[in-house]
Image (tube, grey):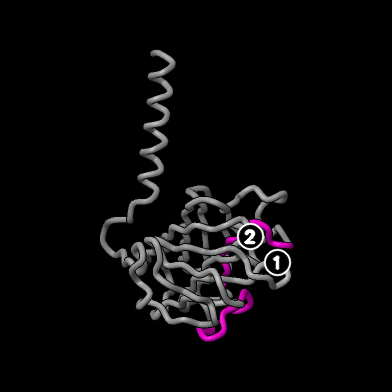
């Protein structure tokens, strides 16, 4: 096969892979909560983040801290999410939140998105306080669209970032609760980069 044909085939494979990554998950049981810039009404707002629909996504880029909290509580489930983050974005998905009015890593499992977290063992792809990631930081979200897949079934939790498993634990501290999408403060409390969610789906198990 000619070199040009090989290159074209490689590019086509890459494009198809990226396209597949951004497709909604089909099949019975999936509930779509964010689809492009639609879905803000499916969440309760906690904190002062300036969540809004913009350019095909749900976006926040100002405020000290804020969450979009699901209106339903979940026990066993799979979450699929597509998001864009900057290098200095502090975000993530908190699951099984014990107190939906005051969400922290002390009362929920925090699946983190923060490439430059001061303590890098719980940077992007980690479950804060429970499952560390390699240091120096390997999994980085900044400057591109990414996917998160989170499965919680009983006391078993797994996290996949861009299709690669980054965390897995057995822990029953938080058995059920709503989940929340975060816009968090940057390093030393300064305003961090934006977070954009363009697809969020959940499938109860």
Residue 108 counted in the magenta span? yes
Secondary structure under the numbered disc 2 in the rendered image: loop
- For residue 129, side relative to residue 146 (left or right): right
Q: Nearer the viewer, residue 37 or 131?
A: 37
Residue 162 location, x and y as percent?
A: 49, 49
Residue at numbered disc 1: 187
> Spatial distance from mark 2 to mark 1, Cα to Cα?
8 Å
Against 123, residue 17 (above or below) is: above
- Which of the numbered marks, if any, corresponds to residue 88? 2
Question: In terms of sequence position, does the residue under pointer 2 or pointer 1 come before the other?
Answer: 2
* Res 75 seen here: yes
Residue furthest top in the image: 2
- Secondary structure mainly formed by the magenta segment: loop
Instruction: For the residues labelled 2 and 1, say whether their Cβ atoms are less than 8 Å apart.
Output: yes
Residue 69 location, x and y as percent?
A: 46, 78
- For residue 108, side relative to residue 146 (left or right): right
Q: Residue at x 68, y 50 (%)?
A: 137
Q: How many marks?
A: 2
* Res 203 seen here: no
Q: Which residues are magenta?
A: 99-118
Quarter of the picture holding the N terminus: top left
Q: Residue at x 72, y 49 (%)?
A: 136
Quarter of the picture holding the C terminus: bottom left
């Amino acid at each position: 096969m000619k070199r040009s044909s090989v290159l074209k085939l490689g590019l086509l494979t890459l494009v198809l892979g990226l396209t597949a990554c951004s497709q909604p998950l089909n099949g019975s049981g999936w509930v779509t909560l964010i689809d492009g810039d639609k879905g803000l009404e499916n969440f309760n707002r906690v904190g002062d983040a300036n969540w809004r629909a913009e350019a095909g996504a749900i976006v926040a880029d100002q405020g000290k801290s804020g969450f979009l909290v699901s209106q339903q509580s979940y026990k066993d489930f799979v979450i699929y999410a597509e998001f864009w983050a900057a290098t200095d974005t502090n975000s993530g998905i908190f699951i099984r939140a014990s107190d939906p009015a005051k969400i922290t890593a002390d009362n929920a499992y925090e699946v983190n998105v923060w490439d430059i977290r001061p303590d890098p063992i719980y940077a992007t792809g980690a479950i804060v306080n429970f499952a560390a990631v390699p240091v120096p930081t390997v999994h980085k979200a900044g400057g591109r669209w990414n996917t998160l897949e989170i499965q919680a079934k009983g006391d078993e939790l797994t996290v996949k970032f861009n299709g690669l498993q980054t965390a897995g634990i057995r822990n029953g501290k938080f058995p059920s609760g709503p989940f929340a999408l975060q816009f968090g403060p940057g390093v030393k409390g300064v305003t961090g980069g934006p977070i954009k969610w363009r697809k969020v789906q959940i499938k109860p198990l």
